[in-house]
Image: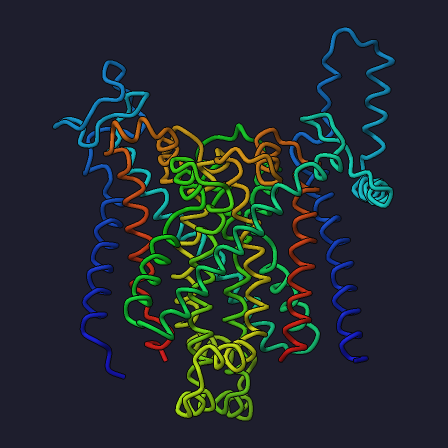
Amino acid sequence: MRTALQKLGLQLLLLAGLSLLGGLLGATLVRFAPGYGVDERELDPRLSEASINAIRNANRLNSSLLSYYGNYLAGAVRGDLGTSQWLDRPVSSLLRERFPVTARSVLFGIALAWALALAVSLASLLFWRSLFDVSGTILSGVLIALPAAVVAMFAVYLRAPAYAAVAAVTFPKIFRYLRNLLEHAYAQPYILAARARGIASTKILVSHVLPLASPALLALLGISLSIGFGAAIPIEALCDSPGLGQLAWQAALNRDLPLIVNLTLLITIFTVALNLLANVRSEKKA
Amino acid sequence: MRRPRGKLAVRAVAALLLLLVFLGAVFAGTLTPYSYAKQFRETPNSPPSSSHLLGTDGLGRDLFARVVYGTRVSLLLGPAAALIATAIAGLLGGFAALAGGWCERVILAAADLSMALPLFFVLVAFRAALPLDISPVVSIIATFLLLGLLGWSSALRVVWAASRDLRNSDFLLLARAAGCTRWRIVFRHVLPNLRPVLFAQFWIAIPVFILTEATLSMLGLGVMEPLPSWGNLLRGLEDFSIVAANPWRTVPLLLLVLVVICFQLVLPSQEESA
């Protein structure tokens, strides 16, 4: 019990370290990006010399990386992640608005992809191996050869929801691992013995195969979340779904670095936290 | 181990197709008399004809010329990015396995964290840090350099595992006992034995990078016009009515899918390599 708690503490420490490091990297990216510190308002002929100097002084406060990062961290502790240069709105309120849309698309998409991958893998193991194995392999082979943006485009053509596109992008990556994992579990001698004794397939699956494969399945679940969030950018951009992916794309096109860096940091912390959780669970099960 | 003849035949056909596409990309100038940017302003959106094999796009540019030159960009720079990623993975993975200790733990933790990141978000963030109005050539270099520099983590784990097995091997113990220097061990014994693993990782990374470039370019964050790449050629497919009326516009997509599938088919599976 103590070891599990220690492991959890270590993972949390790792997550905190990553957040600080990610924040520093993001601050470095913003601070040293070409064009940093250039304020369009300085070109406004209506402003007086004193106003322009005030703007320059305000920008000078963030002139060194450490002061910039310090100000950023101090703001982040208060829940202030800065202001979007493009939308002129607080980044935190934009993230709050958009996160549920992306979370819904990604979670539904991953659930659908897992259900499909599990169904095809189990059908190929339990029923008609050649038919389901070949059809699953062909489907995943074709889907994996399509860029995520093209999958999103097809979803637009077919008027399918964004989560269906997330599922189509995630399915081939899950299916291959899942099939191999289940196949490996089914090939274990004690499962062969259970089948020889006439134990029902569903009982073998639930009582023996899934528990054996569950540590690896949990780790795969963590990875599939990263894949799903990664696919959210092109899918939401092309399917016109107002989530974080679309926001990231628009922020990149408008070079709104504070917004895109905060967005990336948030998604990174979220996916890494879920992955760490999956790892802790899978280690516990193993 | 005997390999099924059917699989070998499929692999040979895939390799031949890849070779043909690659040669077409290298000798693009001899396949088409037109430049990828030359406009035929009197015939925009024209259907396929003897002068324009795949017709022209909305700006009157020859689509066949753009596909051929776009293939050159995607098929030459995809491997270049894969080479960078594999080199980073090879260096870090090999170093981690041979050095051991805290170096190994730090490098593996970095790789695990990097694998947990949604790569596309990170790519878009780094791409956004660069100005958007960069020249097309710089946009190609930036896109593929970013792919190479950020896409090393999954290869690192595999290289590390292979290097760790080598570290514990008898022949390396013998080499150390015989007084071989560290550099001689790395270059004479470790690298030649890692070559198949590195090649497999390089080969696996190529289609991944080609697909990622395609998605980036479709979103306007990859290779810039007028230079063609498979990604920005696919932007022409966004309007379904145009695709339905001009089905030959799907040729870049079909070529991309064919090439990615061929890349997957050419590489032997793990069971076959074992």
Q: Where does the image place residue A219, in percent across and percent down from the top left?
A: 58, 68
User: Which quadrant: the C terminus of chain A?
Assistant: bottom right
Q: Residue at x 62, y 37 (%)?
A: B129
Q: Where does the image place residue A35, in percent across and percent down from the top left?
A: 67, 29
Classify A196 as above or below A143.
below
- The image quarter containing residue A19 is bottom right
Q: Where does the image place residue A236, in percent across and percent down from the top left?
A: 53, 38
Q: Nearer the viewer, residue A58 or A139?
A: A139
Q: Nearer the viewer, residue A52 or A91?
A: A91
Classify B120 as above or below B175.
above
- Number of marks drawn: 0
Colouring of the image = rainbow
- The image quarter containing residue B245 is top left
Q: Nearer the viewer, residue A113 or A68?
A: A113
**Image side of residue A125 versus residue B33, left or right:** right
Q: Residue at x 42, y 62 (%)?
A: B202
What is the residue that sits farthest to the left in this orientation? B50
User: Which quadrant: the N terminus of chain A?
Assistant: bottom right
Q: Residue at x 24, y 13 (%)?
A: B42
**Image side of residue B223 versus residue B164, left or right:** left
**Image side of residue B232 versus residue A7, left or right:** left
Q: Where does the image place residue B69, in percent across and percent down from the top left?
A: 30, 38
Classify A241 as above or below B121.
above
Q: Nearer the viewer, residue A163 or B210?
A: A163
